[in-house]
Image: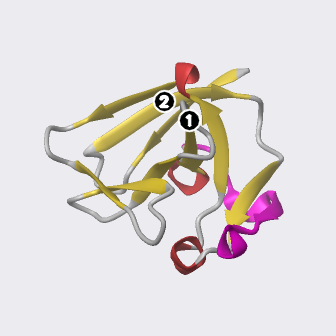
Amino acid sequence: MQPYKASCHCGAIHFTFEAEPFTKGLRCNCSYCSRRGTMMHLVPGALFHIDAKEGALNFYRFGKEQAKHYFCKTCGISTFSETTRRPGQYIVNLGCVEGVDTFALETTVFDGKNLL
């Protein structure tokens, strides 16, 4: 495991976590995620720490409200999510992580479009 640092574009939201070095990421094909084009990775809550300026962090829910998609209220960058399918875990936007080139990662697709 190695430590990672991440932030939104303007720096109002920072988060850190531990994970194995990245070789692949996850993309979801639901209507929200496909529009964002986010490459994601699942992180256990015990290894995830948020440091956000007061009032900077907000979230968006849609449809069956199975996920909270967190974003920065200042710059609009989607930073991470929480889902009811994975309680106690965070889905981080790898595009926010320092030193990670999401274009160099192998991609796995999660079929969020066809969830029951």
Q: Residue 82: image x %, image y %?
A: 49, 45
Percent x, y for residue 20? 77, 29
Q: Residue furthest left?
A: 54
Q: Position of residue 49 (x, y in %)?
A: 43, 26
Q: Label 1: state its secondary structure.
A: loop
Q: Quadrant of residue 116?
A: bottom right
Q: Amino acid at mark 2?
A: Thr
Quarter of the rendering containing residue 88: top right
- In the displayed orientation, state which residue is furthest to the front: 116
- Category of crowding for the residue at label 2, using alpha-carbon neighbours closer than 10 angstroms: few (below 14), some (14–19), many (at least 20): some
Asked if 28 appears above or below 88 in the picture, the reply is below
Q: Between marks 2 and 1, how big is the CA–CA gap? A: 19 Å
Mark 2 or mark 1: name the one nearer the start of the chain: 2
Question: What residue does disc 2 label?
Answer: 16
The residue range painted magenta reads 98-116
Left or right side of 62 for 12: left
- Residue 94, compared with residue 115, is above or below; it is above
Residue 87, which numbered label?
A: 1
